[in-house]
Image: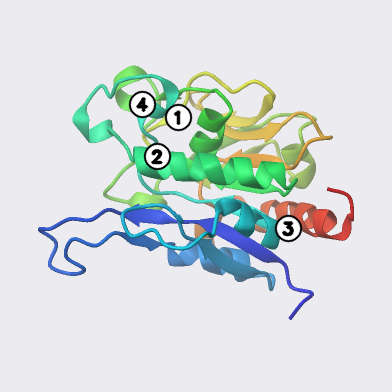
């Protein structure tokens, strides 16, 4: 088993709620099944990284311990990123997001950065990475960009699709040389507004130019890339972009770091 990559997946939070019938008043941390199975699809081991802080905190385990032990990190989807995390107030209460999860994931990214380990973001993960490195978000596409495409449709959920233009000459273009325009699923109502310094846009929505993929520009620093769509939701019988090349690119970076004896 020692040859298998160990990939951490950031936790989603269901915060304590005394009105909930199940696990009344308890905080739950969990991962969505599809993202774990996606990571495991080529034989890597998926490991949820629980937040070590909170009202029930015990022991001395830190996120740095996980970053030292694991080979890479995937940040997956879930609750909105809080506008407070990028210096804004929520335009509406329903877009307040999850500041607690933001702080946990920002610290998690920093821990993997310190260890020189690769990080890949999915949907919320892309937004969180952008915010962690100083970027900002549109709190709600429909409100702030009224002429934009509908990027989230709760009725059809992951069957909401649109076209994406891949930037020529990008790493993403090298991974998908068969075509500049691809089809992706779309399940988000927030999006990158100001791109964080040190990142390049690798893909945008064909219809409205919303940023759909980013990557760190400094190849001398640890691998850091993200997409706005959900590659883990791709089905073999679908005409959406195949997830395999994205996953393999990330896992190859994880394998390369593990083989490199330097810090």
- Name the image quarter holding the N terminus: bottom right
Instruction: Report if residue 215 is visible in the image.
Output: yes
Between marks 2 and 3, how big is the CA–CA gap?
25 Å
In this picture, is 158 found above or below 20?
A: above
Earlier-in-chain disc, 1 versus 3: 1
Helix, strand or loop for disc 4: helix
Q: Position of residue 130 (x, y in %)?
A: 55, 30
Quarter residue 70 falls in:
bottom right
Position of 89 relative to 47 (above/below): above
Instruction: Determine the CA span between mark 4 and mark 2.
Output: 19 Å
Residue 99 falls left or right of residue 47: left
- Determine which residue is flagged by label 1: 191
Vertical order, 120 against 141 (above or below): below
**Residue identifier under label 4:** 84
Q: Which residue is mark 2?
A: 188
Residue 178 x/y as whole percent: 75, 45
The span from disc 1 to disc 3 (Cα, nearest Å) is 26 Å
Cβ–Cβ below 8 Å for labels 2 and 1?
yes
Q: Earlier in the sequence, mark 1 or mark 4?
A: 4
Q: Decide which of 161, 142 is in the foreground and name it.
A: 142
Gap in Å between the C-alphas at discs 2 and 1?
7 Å
Residue at 59% x, 67% y is 46
Give how far apart the Cα atoms at labels 3 and 4 are.
Answer: 32 Å
Give the mark nearest the N terminus, 4 or 2. Answer: 4
Q: CA distance from mark 1 to mark 4?
A: 15 Å
Give the mark nearer the N terminus: 2 vs 3: 2
Is 263 placed left or right of 102 in the picture? Answer: right
């Amino acid at each position: 088993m020692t040859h298998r990559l160990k990939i951490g997946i950031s936790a989603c939070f269901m915060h304590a709620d005394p009105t909930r019938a199940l696990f009344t008043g308890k905080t739950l941390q969990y991962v969505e099944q599809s993202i774990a199975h996606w990571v495991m699809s080529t034989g890597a081991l998926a490991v949820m990284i629980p937040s070590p802080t909170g009202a029930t905190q015990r022991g001395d385990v830190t996120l740095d311990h996980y970053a030292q032990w694991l080979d890479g990190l995937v940040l997956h989807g879930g609750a909105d990123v809080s506008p407070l995390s990028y210096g804004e107030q929520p335009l509406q209460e329903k877009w307040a997001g999850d500041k607690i999860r933001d702080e946990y994931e920002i610290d998690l990214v920093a821990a993997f950065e310190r260890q020189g380990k690769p990080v890949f973001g999915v949907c919320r993960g892309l937004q969180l990475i952008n915010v962690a490195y100083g970027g900002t978000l549109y709190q709600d596409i429909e409100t702030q960009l009224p002429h934009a495409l509908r990027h989230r449709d709760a009725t059809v959920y992951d069957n909401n699709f649109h076209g994406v233009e891949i930037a020529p000459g990008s790493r993403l273009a090298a991974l998908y040389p068969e075509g500049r325009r691809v089809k992706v699923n779309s399940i988000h109502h927030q999006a990158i507004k100001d791109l964080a310094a040190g990142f390049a846009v690798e893909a945008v929505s064909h219809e409205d130019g919303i940023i759909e993929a980013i990557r760190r520009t400094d190849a001398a620093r640890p691998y850091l890339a993200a997409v706005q769509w959900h590659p883990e939701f791709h089905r073999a019988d679908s005409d959406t972009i195949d997830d395999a090349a994205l996953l393999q690119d990330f896992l190859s970076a994880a394998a390369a770091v593990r083989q490199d004896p330097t810090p």
